[in-house]
């Protein structure tokens, strides 16, 4: 795929990071323009180029940039998966191509080489608070300098990427939330497929309990025109039978599905918009434009953090409604089967799926706790607020597994309700088959 500093989407980040797509550079013109501007400002105080950083912003320095990288290359915790590290490289490359950084443009070609030849930096999980992924990008810079080894994919024999970063390139390279945006992009791209799969699973449950399609009628959703609600209702309307139901009203898991799941779709759309804005933004500090260096706060991650904090509780509501439909599927009043879809009176049938689903819902509730209600004051008070989008993105990634499990539980029960009862047996294989069906259209 061609990168040009604009038009990078969450889907394309996923494609390059997880599906093996190669990248190419459309043009270095904007990167060169920002670099040229910086050369004209030699002799003036510019944050990070001629001064220290953070509380040291008033200390004039000469040639301290490489020490900045060495001091900030500190992470902790589990290693970051190669796909997520590669996604960070894609995001940072695209940001640099958008212009505004004063970095030597040749570094862009080194990043593209790393992406295309299977090299990723050895990143760790902890080390950022939503005001720039300083530890991850400093580690990457030291890999480019040859001071730290790259991780390489099995079978890769190409030489390691190298670029002679100058002292003046140090802060421009790490002044970015690329790792956070990478996690966020991967998370929302994969969530999109699960949200679509949830509609397919709900259709199975509608059929299993002969739920009324009346709540899905277009006239209902024209009366309350939330876009996600209308889209979900239309999608489900195309999957379910429209014969009149014998019941006047079904439980909320069916009757309010479009409203609840549609709200989650709207929250997902808002998160994607916030993330994709930043994927193509010049979030540099300083920003080199119009022949000047503009000191600013574009690095702050509040828009992405707040969007992800709104998304995760919406996922909880989708999961809760799935668990509610699962409970209905256990009820003979709705299925016409024995309790718990058992094959004989007194057998437990699929009862245990409710336990599994509620365990996963509880995990989602925990992950939904907002990160943006906290803050941090660091660097002797010079940096007195933090967005914590890093944690918001990480928690959103972690939401994928429990949401998938809840939907798989519903799907497994709906499939049994639509088929013949079966003797009691371990349901692990059934549940795994449903999980695979949910993610079959989702690339690894």
Image (tube, helix red, strand yellow):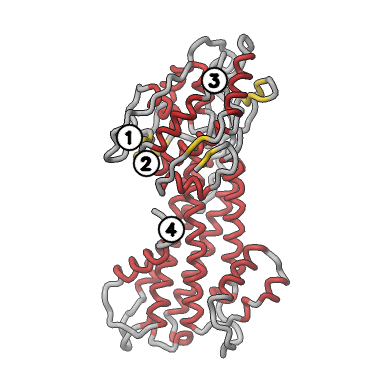
- Residue 53 got which mark? 3
In the image, residue 116 sits, relative to residue 355, either above or below, namely: above
Is the C-beta separation of discs 2 and 1 under 8 Å? yes
* Precedes in sequence: disc 2 or disc 1: 2
State left or right for residue 401 relative to residue 278.
Answer: left
Circle 1 Cα neighbour tier, 10 Å, few/some/many (<14 / 14–19 / ≥20): some
Q: Disc 3 versus disc 4: distance between alpha carbons?
A: 42 Å
* Precedes in sequence: disc 3 or disc 1: 3
- Residue 151 got which mark? 1
Residue 370 vs residue 192, the one in the foreground = 192
* Precedes in sequence: disc 4 or disc 2: 2
Residue 32 vs residue 123, the one in the foreground = 32
| Coordinates of residue 404 in the picture (x, y in percent) | 42, 62
Q: Residue at x 64, y 14 (%)?
A: 41
- Residue 442 got which mark? 4
Q: What residue sits right under mark 2 in the picture? A: 82
Residue 62 vs residue 158, the one in the foreground = 158
Res 76 seen here:
no
Circle 2 Cα neighbour tier, 10 Å, few/some/many (<14 / 14–19 / ≥20): many
Q: Residue at x 33, y 34 (%)?
A: 151
* Foreground label between 3 and 2: 2
Is the C-beta separation of discs 3 and 2 under 8 Å? no
Element at badge 1?
strand
């Amino acid at each position: 795929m061609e990168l040009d500093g604009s038009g990078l989407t969450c889907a394309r980040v996923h494609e390059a990071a997880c599906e093996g797509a190669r990248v190419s550079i459309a043009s270095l013109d904007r990167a060169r323009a920002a670099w040229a501007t910086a050369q004209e400002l030699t002799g003036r105080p510019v944050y990070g180029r001629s001064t220290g950083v953070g509380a040291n912003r008033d200390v004039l320095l000469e040639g301290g940039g490489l020490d900045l990288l060495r001091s900030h290359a500190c992470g902790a915790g589990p290693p970051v998966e190669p796909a997520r590290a590669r996604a960070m490289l894609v995001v940072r490359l695209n940001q640099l191509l958008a212009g505004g950084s004063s970095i030597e443009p040749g570094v862009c070609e080194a990043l593209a080489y790393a992406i295309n030849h299977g090299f990723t930096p050895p990143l760790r999980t902890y080390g950022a608070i939503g005001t720039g992924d300083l530890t991850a990008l400093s580690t990457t810079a030291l890999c480019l300098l040859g001071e730290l080894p790259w991780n390489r994919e099995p079978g890769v024999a190409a030489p390691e990427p190298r670029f002679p970063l100058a002292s003046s390139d140090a802060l421009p390279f790490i002044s970015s939330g690329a790792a956070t945006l990478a996690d966020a992009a991967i998370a929302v791209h994969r969530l999109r497929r699960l949200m679509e799969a949830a509609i397919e699973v709900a259709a199975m449950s509608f059929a299993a309990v002969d739920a009324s399609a009346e709540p899905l009628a277009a006239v209902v959703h024209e009366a309350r025109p939330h876009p996600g609600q209308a889209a979900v209702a239309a999608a489900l309307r195309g999957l379910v039978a429209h014969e009149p139901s014998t019941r006047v009203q079904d439980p909320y898991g069916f009757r309010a599905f479009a409203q609840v799941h549609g709200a989650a779709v709207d929250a997902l759309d808002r998160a994607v918009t916030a993330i994709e804005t930043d994927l193509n933004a010049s979030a540099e500090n300083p920003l080199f434009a119009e022949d000047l260096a503009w000191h600013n706060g574009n690095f702050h991650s509040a828009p992405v953090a707040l969007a992800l904090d709104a998304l995760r509780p919406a996922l909880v509501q989708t999961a809760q409604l799935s668990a509610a439909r699962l409970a209905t599927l256990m009820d003979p009043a709705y299925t016409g089967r024995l309790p718990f879809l058992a094959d004989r009176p007194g057998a437990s049938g699929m009862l245990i799926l409710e336990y599994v689903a509620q365990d996963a819902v509880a995990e989602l509730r925990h992950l939904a706790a907002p990160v943006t209600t906290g803050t941090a004051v660091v660097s002797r008070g010079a940096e007195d607020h933090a967005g914590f989008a890093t944690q918001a993105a990480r928690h959103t990634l972690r939401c994928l597994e429990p949401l998938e499990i809840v939907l798989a539980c519903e799907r497994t029960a709906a499939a049994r309700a639509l088929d013949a009862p079966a003797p009691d047996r371990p349901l692990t294989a059934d549940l795994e088959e449903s999980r695979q069906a949910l993610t079959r259209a989702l690339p690894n």
